[in-house]
Image: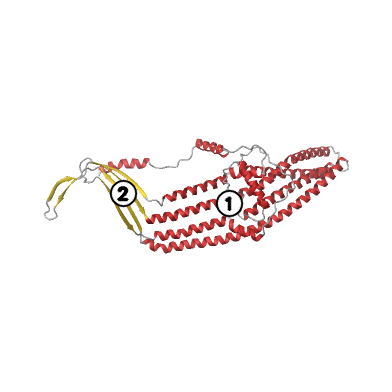
Amino acid sequence: MTVLKLAGLPLLVLVAGCAVTPQPLSVSHLGQTADRNLARVDADKEPVSGPIDLYEAMARALKYNLDYKVEMMNEALKVREMDLARYDMLPQIVANGGYAGRSNYSGASSLSLLSRRQSLEPSTSSEKNVFTGDLTLSWDVLDFGLSYVRAKQRADEVLIAQEQRRKVSTRIIEDVRTSYWRAVSAERLLTKLQALEDSVSTTLDHSERLAERRLSPPLTALTYQRELIDIQAQVRRLQRELVIAKAQLAALMNLKPGTPFNLVLPDRGSALPPVHQSGEEMMITALRNRSELREVSYRQRINARELDAALLRALPSFRGLVGANVDSNSFLFNQNWVQWGARASWNVLNVFRYPAQKKAVRAQDAVLQQRELALTMAVITQVHVARARYAHLAEELETAAHQLAVQEKIKRQIEAGYRAGAMSQQTQLREEMNTLVAEVQYDIAYADAQNAYANLYSSMGIDGFGADLTGRETVKALSASLATGWDARSRAAVLK
């Protein structure tokens, strides 16, 4: 008993030494990780060399946006998993090597069952030290069938990853169009807004000094100051909205916050692209192309193959093998030989489990079918809403353009009157503010209409880029391809 306790003591020490305790990350490790991530976020990107137009903004988003890169990496992972699943269909080739040694010979004697006397003196048929090795090829028919089904499922998962990447790319392009046109408005108007705010601040200070000296009636001065403060508040609200738009565009292009860049400023008054398709054509196109519906179809196919896998598991397994063996034991008559054989096995309980598995697969299929119907209704509703939204926003843009044109005429009249001394500075500042507001409203209406145009195509599941593009091309090549594709789309009479 004492010997057993002494033998168990090293085991207890070993177990105690292997105890695992939580080890939080050190401050230095966290700092190194933060520095490394900050450097990698902005690494390996083409520098901004000039003003960015809409299609270069889209190209940079597709090439450098981190959300899109995650989907690309996920798709690459699914491809690797599919390639790995193919190896499961191959036969197994197993090489084994071994060594066995002992302090004395392994020997035995025989005892007669009849006379109960020893019939053979102790003898051995094995050396003290023996080396063995074998190389065996085996192939299980059932494993091959299951591996084939799993490989087909992996292939469908690759297609699902592609659809998820398409969905993210469509959302990114839609967001880029909105942020770009809002950022264009910021580029146009921020300087004007700053100049107007400076003018309002100066006039407000002057009015307050006049009121303090009693050079103007108190109520008149306070009313004037209230209007100036209201104008100042409107200016600052507009500045906030416009500055945020440019920061959002920079984030979509994965530009580090604070990176300076300029935008190409198209002339105001650009016509919106026309829509040639009827509502019915758009709905049919959406039901064919939407990534969500395609993803459900692939999942239905994966689920159907799960029924095949359940059926295969209920069948007997047949394994054949052939192998070469070698043994260093000199007492053996043959120290190397080839062996072969076959074995059949059948887990009978799988036969009783199959009906339950079949019901589970059919229940999952019913869920997927219902989800497909729900998505179908959601998709056709989205198409209808997107089409109506685009039409309404186009009308709102037309109204904003008309309002801007009228406001510019009023501003010219007020400026002429101010220069002639017939209008007060208060009136002139108010109309400058109204004109800037009208310009911002027009730009925002134009941005919303462009967003609605992109949303119309995304609701139909049509990619914002050509099928030949992967996102790994240069920014220039991506930009040129996107410009060509969207220009052709705006002129096309039929969706492709």
Q: Is residue 231 left or right of residue 22?
A: right
Q: Is residue 217 left or right of residue 488?
A: right
Up the image or down, 314 lies above or below 409; here it is below
Between circles 1 and 2, the one closer to the viewer is 2
Amino acid carrying mark 2 in the image: Gly
* Callouts 1 and 2 close, C-beta under 8 Å: no
Position in image of residue 295 (x %, y %): 54, 55
Q: Residue at x 68, y 42 (%)?
A: 243
Which quadrant is the N terminus positioned in? top left
The residue at which mark 1 appears reads as 167
Position in image of residue 65 (x %, y %): 59, 44
Is residue 217 in view?
Answer: no
Which picture quadrant has residue 54? top right
Up the image or down, 454 lies above or below 34; here it is below
Residue 323 — which label? 2
Amino acid carrying mark 1 in the image: Lys
